[in-house]
Each structure stands twice: as C-alpha cells, then as structure tokens.
Amino acid sequence: MSDFLFLGMSKIAFFGALETGLIYALVALGVLISFRVLDFPDLTADGSFPLGGAVCAVCIVQPPTSPLSFLSNPWLATFLGMAAGAAAGLVTAWLNVSLKILHLLASILVMVALYSVNLRIMGAPNVPLLGEATVFTPFLTPENSFYMKALVIFAFVVVFKLLLDWFFSTEIGLSVRATGANQRMAQAQGIATRKMVVFGMALSNALIALGGALFVQIYGSADISIGVGTIVIGLAAVIIGETLMPTKRIILITVSVIVGSILYRLFIQLALGNETLSDLGLKSQDVNLVTAVLVVIALVLPKLKSQMLKRKMKHGA
C-alpha cells in the first residue's frame, strides 16, 4: 500500500483519523438522540465519555488474584462502561423531570460531579492499558494492525446504527420521538413523556460512554481529561452531517451523523497536517478551536445558501 492515501496523509494518519472518527460517530449518535430527537441540551457527554473509559479501563486492569478478576474480560468491561454512561444519563434526566431542574443546568451539574466520580473510579488521573487484552486483540496481527482497529470500530458503529434505526421504528422509539417533537401533544396522546425522557437520555449517554470505552482501548490508557470538548465534537458531527445530507428519514439521519463524524476527523487531521497552517502556528492543542470554526462554518453555510437562492429568485422575477 502506498505511504500516502488521502490528500497527503500517511496511511497511519488516515486510519488514525478514521478510528477516531468512527469512535466519535457513536458519540454523535448519542448527541443526536439528546439534542435532535429529545430536544434536550445535554452537556453530560463531557463526563459520560470519560466515565465509560474509566469503568472499562479499571475493569480490564483487574489482576488475576483479585476477586473481581472476571471483570477483566474486555467485552464485559466495555459493556459495563456503557452501562455506567446510561446511569449518568439517567441521573441527568431524573434531575430534570423529577426535581424540575432546567435541563441544561441538570446536565452541567452531572458533568461537574462526574469529574470527581471518574477520579474516584480510576484512583488516579490516568490508568494505563499497555499490554492488556482489549476487544481488538483477537483480530490484530502485525500485518493488519493499522486498519483492523478501524474495521472493528466500524462494526460497532454499524450494529448500533441498525439497532437505533430499528428502535426508532418501535412503539417506544416513536414515543421518544413524539416527546421530543411536541411534549404536550405527546402527553395528550397518553405517552408517559417523563419516562421517555429518562429512557432517551440513558440511551444517549450509553452510546457516548461506549465511545469512551473503545477510545481508551484504542489509545492504551484512560485519562481524566479525555472528555474535554466531547459535546462540541458530537455536535460538530451532527451539524456537518445534517448540512451535507439534509433529510427527515431516521435511517438516513443516522448515516449522515456517522459520515459527519468521519469527515470532521479527516478535516481536523488535514488542518493539523497542513504545512501552511502549521507555519501560521496551528498545533494539536488547537483542535477545539478548529472544531469551533468548523461548526460555525457548517451553521452559516445553509443560511448563506438560502439567502443566495432568495436573491436569485428575486432578481429572476
């Protein structure tokens, strides 16, 4: 295979960006549920992403002599990380629907609390996984290591994308969508909207935590800081996907979110690897800045396009 695959990126850089893009596709699917389906501005993601990674990492590093050594199975550890994220989303929803705390404030409170919770779980700011078995280990060989991880993550993304498509076609899934679209109308139709919000938020953060669990296994350690900017990245993927593939069908919406996440990471990799931008001082610590710029561009482009069409029609008339 050539050393350069895509606009000057090395194959290692390309597949690295692809791996990260696919992991954040799971995050973006979770953000899609909270922000777009439930209309619930949720910042819990910045806490539930590292929560999933922390739980997964702590389980994997359990020594053979420990009474909890059975948790070291990476598949079980990944599932437990996902379950922890669901619990975080459940707490956020409970604060909102039961204690009547504003949804944005409820999510901020949980996000802040999770920083301490994650430190408690890990017992240190960082838990290394070097040399430990992960969900990727059975599939890796020296020849395929640079692309096999991306394939395994892609399998995760496809499975959960299909499960989401199926779920939103069920009665409960349609109830969740109805709750987000018009809560008063949903209540008038006999839908238990409070339960739908709780269920939807748990599902959203479970997917985000799953992304965190896979992230730490890819990069070989769980770190307390990996959640910084998670919600912005998820929103960027959703907005980019919606801009490129505007649609109302849930099957295509989930596709657009996945595509948006992958393209976002490729854009970031290109920006950080661009010699001109590097000469201007752009470095890896500017990822969140680049993300913010991309989100602004993605938000502004449809409005500019609409204004240009109106002007064209006006002049044409």
Image: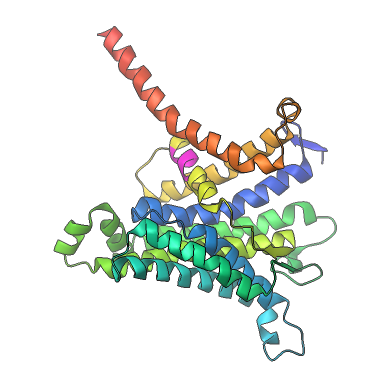
The residue lying toward the viewer, choosing from 296 and 317, is 296
Q: Nearer the viewer, residue 313 or 152?
A: 313
Residue at left offset 40%, top offset 56%: 34
The kind of secondary structure the magenta stretch mainly shows is helix
- x, y percent for residue 273: 73, 35
Q: Is residue 88 visible?
A: yes
Q: Residue at x 76, y 32 (%)?
A: 8
Give coordinates of residue 73: x percent, y percent: 68, 78
**Which residues are drawn in magenta?**
238-242
In the visual, does 90 lie left or right of 20? left
Q: Is residue 37 left or right of residue 192?
A: right
* Residue 255 drawn above or below residue 273: below
Q: Quadrant of residue 299?
A: top left
Specify whether 13 is left or right of 55. Answer: right
Residue 194 lies within the magenta run: no
Looking at the image, the residue that sits furthest to the right is: 142
**Relative height, residue 98 to residue 111 (above, below):** below
Q: Nearer the viewer, residue 304 or 279?
A: 279
Whether 69 is drawn above or below 292: the answer is: below
Residue 306 lies, in percent from the top left, at: 35, 24
Residue 31 in the image, given as x and y percentages of width and height: 45, 54
Residue at image coords 64%, 42%: 287
In the displayed structure, 34 sits above or below 68; it is above
Does residue 113 appear left or right of residue 16 in this picture? left
The answer to which of 291 and 33 lies nearer the viewer is: 291
All told, the count of numbered labels is 0
